[in-house]
Image: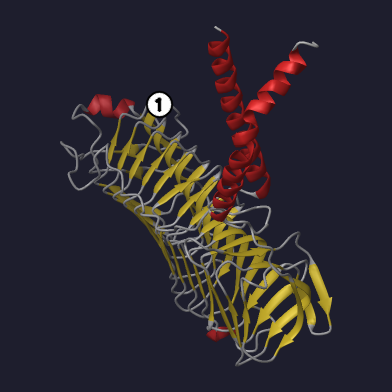
């Protein structure tokens, strides 16, 4: 040990002429390195509440904005929310009777954070907590990440809800969009973990949205709305439509239980529906179900009868591929005599049962279908009446083989017969082929995934202060080691 210290001292004496230039070099290098680094800037925080009576802009520089009470934008007044702004509703609500321009960008979203649901009891009435009320058509929310928030279009506090037609476009939303309006709202290209409820209006347009994890993805109560090219999955019910003249054209739906419930007269077309208890459920409906592929469901198409007091049902099922379900089509009991069903030009194949019929059936035309290769029966009839299913293709022209695929009087003498003659002698070319699948929708939303923490992050292109200190220390240590090793080697060479 005593021999070691003289060696260190002698090395230090040798290094002495080099120490000053070395430290200067390290200092200059460190300053140069620091000059290339962007340190995170600390932003201001702004508390807001009360009534906005003049045009106001919420800026990124003063973000985040925290509501310490309800905020109301008066009629004729504009509230602009810049890209990159964070808004914390903080169990309050934002109510807009004027103009709301909340437009982020694909690279710089607006963040709006809510929380648990509840009711705010105020002098003007009861409002939902963590909610945004859009009371005019001059409201737009675009390129925002919205967490645990209800967006309410119109509402009981809006003077004229019939003219409320806001635009909600290209957002990532965790929560609900609720209609209390009869305008022409546009809701498109959003990613929604939640639901769109009580859709109403003259011509609302709901398109190209991705909706997941809800009891009902979209509840429709509109007269002439358009619901198209939406992707809905992980919901108990994909779409529930309960009023008339709604056009429903959802392209691709994957759900857990009931996929589509229709209670009106919509057109449901070009959907791919898989893995549900009910693929399509027409409930007291005169729906046109066309050009869908329904597979892997307990019941592919369930054509429920009307309830007392409902209008008569006249559903039509045409040009669909219904395959790989337990029941391809189920027409249960309970229809009235004045109701009518059309089932034509479909391919119903590889199900356990192709078509199952209840006891009390409406008048119906089931013809020009390809009904074949269903594992148990092509047809199961529970009706005591004679049922006519003529002019269909059964996969063969052998009458005996066809008859054995139909469960009727010959298996249970309490049932009526199913007439299948005459039948088609070749597949119907107007029905889908067994490999037919409608085109899936294009999803154009470029909204970034939601930041569930709601914290603003400052983009940095370099290193932070701690990282710089560590890097500088490593540089010094490495440089010293190089010098020491060089000097030791030089001294050893001299002693030789």
Q: Taking 421 as reference, is 99 left or right?
A: right
In the picture, residue 85 is in which quadrant? bottom right
Q: Nearer the viewer, residue 21 or 368?
A: 21
| Quarter of the view holding residue 180 | bottom right
Can you see residue 469? yes
According to the image, label 1 marks what residue?
376
The answer to which of 13 and 373 lies nearer the viewer is 13
| Residue 203 percent across, percent down from the top left | 44, 76
In front of the other: 483 or 234: 483
Residue at the extreme top of the image, as rendered:
496
User: Residue 97, position in %: x, y?
Assistant: 63, 86
The residue sitting at 55% across, 85% down in the picture is 162
Residue 408 shows in this picture: no
Image quadrant in which the N terminus is located = top right
Q: Is residue 369 above or below residue 487?
A: below
| Nearer-the-camera pick, 477 or 266 | 477
Horizontally, residue 215 falls left or right of residue 431, namely: right
Q: How is the image coloured?
A: secondary structure
Count how many numbered circles sit on residues in the image: 1
Dot 1 falls on a residue whose secondary structure is loop
Q: Where 424 falls versus 249 (above or below)?
A: above
Q: Position of residue 308 (x, y in %)?
A: 59, 63
Residue 86, by quadrant, is bottom right
What is the x, y in percent for residue 103? 52, 72
Label 1 Cα crowd, 10 Å radius (few <14 / some 14-19 / many 20+): some
Q: Give the residue drawn at x 42%, y 30%.
A: 352
Please state, as top left, top right, bottom left or bottom right, where the C terminus lies in the image.
Answer: top right
Could you tell me which residue is drawn at 54 percent across and 47 percent down? 258
């Amino acid at each position: 040990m005593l021999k070691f210290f003289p060696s260190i001292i002698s090395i230090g004496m040798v290094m002495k002429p080099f120490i000053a230039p070395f430290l200067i070099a390290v200092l200059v290098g460190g300053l140069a390195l620091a000059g290339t680094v962007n340190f995170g800037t600390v932003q201001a925080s702004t508390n807001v509440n009360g009534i906005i009576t003049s045009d106001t802009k919420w800026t990124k520089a003063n973000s985040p904005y925290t509501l310490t009470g309800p905020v109301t934008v008066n009629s004729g007044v504009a509230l602009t929310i810049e890209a990159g702004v964070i808004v914390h509703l903080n169990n309050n609500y934002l109510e807009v009777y004027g103009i709301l321009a909340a437009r982020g960008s694909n690279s710089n979203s607006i963040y709006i954070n809510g929380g648990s649901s509840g009711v705010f009891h105020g002098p003007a009435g009861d409002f939902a907590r963590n909610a945004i009320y859009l009371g005019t058509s001059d409201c737009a929310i675009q390129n925002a990440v919205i967490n645990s928030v209800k967006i309410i279009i119109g509402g009981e506090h809006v003077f004229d809800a019939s003219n409320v037609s806001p635009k909600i476009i290209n957002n990532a939303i965790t929560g609900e969009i609720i209609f209390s309006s009869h305008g022409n709202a546009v809701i498109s290209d959003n990613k929604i973990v939640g639901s769109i409820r009580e859709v109403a209006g003259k011509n609302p347009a709901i398109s190209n949205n991705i909706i997941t994890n809800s009891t009902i993805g979209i509840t429709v109560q509109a007269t002439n709305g358009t619901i198209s090219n939406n992707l809905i999955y992980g919901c108990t019910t994909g779409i529930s439509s309960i009023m008339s003249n709604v056009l429903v054209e959802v392209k691709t739906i994957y759900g857990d239980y009931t996929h589509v419930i229709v209670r009106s007269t919509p057109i449901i077309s070009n959907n791919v529906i898989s893995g549900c208890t009910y693929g399509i459920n027409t409930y007291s409906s005169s729906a046109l179900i066309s050009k869908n592929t329904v597979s892997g469901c307990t019941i592919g198409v369930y054509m429920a009868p009307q309830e007392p007091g409902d209008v008569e049902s006249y559903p039509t099922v045409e040009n669909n591929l219904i395959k790989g379900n337990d029941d391809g089509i189920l027409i249960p009991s309970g229809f009235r005599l004045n109701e009518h069903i059309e089932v034509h030009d479909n391919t119903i194949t590889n199900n356990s049962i192709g078509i199952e019929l209840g006891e009390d059936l409406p008048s119906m035309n089931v013809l020009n279908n390809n009904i074949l290769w269903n594992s148990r029966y092509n047809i199961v009839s529970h009706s005591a009446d004679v049922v006519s299913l003529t002019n269909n293709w059964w996969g063969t022209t052998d009458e005996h083989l066809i008859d054995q695929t139909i469960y009727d009087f010959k298996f249970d003498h309490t049932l009526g017969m199913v007439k299948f003659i005459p039948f088609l002698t070749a597949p119907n070319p107007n029905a889908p082929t067994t490999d037919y699948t409608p085109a899936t929708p294009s999803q154009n939303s470029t909204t970034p995934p939601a930041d569930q923490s709601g914290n603003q992050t400052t983009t940095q292109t370099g290193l932070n202060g701690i990282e710089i200190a560590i890097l500088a220390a490593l540089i010094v240590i490495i440089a010293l080691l190089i010098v020491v090793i060089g000097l030791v080697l030089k001294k050893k060479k001299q002693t030789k």
